[in-house]
Image: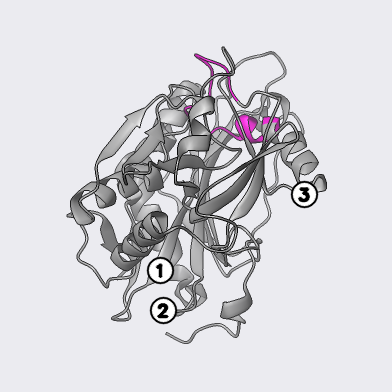
Amino acid sequence: MAKKNIDWANLSFEYQPTDMSYVSQWKDGVWDDGQLVADSNITLNECACVFQYAQTCFEGLKAYETVDGKVVIFRPDLNAQRLADSARTLEMAPVPEDKFIEAVKQVVKANIDYVPPYGSGAALYIRPFEFGSSAVIGVAPADEYQFRILVTPVGPYFKEGVKPIYIRVCDCDRAAPHGTGHIKAGLNYAMSLHNIVEAHKLGFAENMYLDAATRTYVEETGGANFLFVTKDGKLVTPESDSILPSITRRSLMIVAEKYLGMEVEQRKVRFDEVKDFAEIGLCGTAAVISPIGKINDHGTDIEVPSGMDEIGPVLGKLRETLIDIQEGRLEAPEGWIVEIK
């Protein structure tokens, strides 16, 4: 490999074009074979369903260079399952899971020189997505779809890196019970854009959303799941039918229990409990774990005991252990790591 001439250590979490993307079309009830393309632009009819009725869903995963120089991806089978679940919920044609995984391998291999070097702290972000591409004017699903994958090298999701962030409790609702909060639909993220822009203007890094029905329980942020650590070292994650089943969160729960010997509990988390946790963080593909130092509840700060200076010891060890697995310094559970050959 001949790495691209990129300042890997100073990458931000922003899109930059790479050499090749992947595209496959669904028409007349079948997916075509798919192909790699050099053109990163898409031409669609002005009445395409994705524009009119937001019929689109996406995924996010990363490719890494390991300590021994291999390029790997992390648990792509779960991304494939989740994209198919999202597609079915939106009445879209699901991409077969084997097709998804093979397409991810193809596009990473075609852009292998954009995979950041081991130790840089950066990764090649992989964005598979699907959308309704045929023209629809009445409210109905499309009858043609595109499945595409783009890749782009990225640095940390939060500019603070792994420094603790300051978030606020949001008065708006991210997702309704029995709605679409459990799938990775573009419309969910559109709903959060006004709230995150407002939060940034007020000096907060993210929003904490509470359940829409009672505003009693913690749900998630606009783009990540919560992790809580109790004073006696237990890992707690919120349980809700209206939050996204994060692959990173599910992986961290296994790492906590199997690698670190922690007790792990997934349950409803009352907002009034938040002040009692020793450490709080966000987790997701983009950030892995980002610690939270303070939460603003309508003008009153809840100060997390681990503080605003650095990640707490439990979440720090948890983050370090997962990254060690992803980058090949620790043996991974079977099936977690897929090598690009």
Inspect the magenta stretch and tell me whether residue 179 lies in it: yes
Q: Which residue position holds label 2?
A: 118
Could you give the CA–CA distance between mark 2 and mark 3, rounded to whole angstroms?
33 Å
Which portion, as a residue range, is magenta? 175-191
Nearer to us of marks 2 and 3 is 3
Residue in view at x 41 percent, y 79 percent: 118
Query: What is the quadrant of residue 332 in the picture?
Result: bottom left
Mark 1, residue position: 64
Rendered position, 199 above or below 13? above
Q: Position of residue 223 (x, y in %)?
A: 57, 42
Q: Residue at x 46, y 30 (%)?
A: 86
Residue at 77% over, 35% down:
194
Vertical placement of 206 versus 30: above or below? below
Q: Is residue 256 left or right of residue 116?
A: left
The picture places residue 154, in percent across and down from the top left corner, at: 57, 66
**Secondary structure of the residue carrying numbered label 3:** loop
Q: Amino acid at mark 1?
A: Tyr
Q: Secondary structure at mark 2?
A: loop
Instruction: Compare marks 1 and 3 and give the one earlier in the sequence.
Output: 1
Rendered location of residue 278, percent (x, y): 44, 46
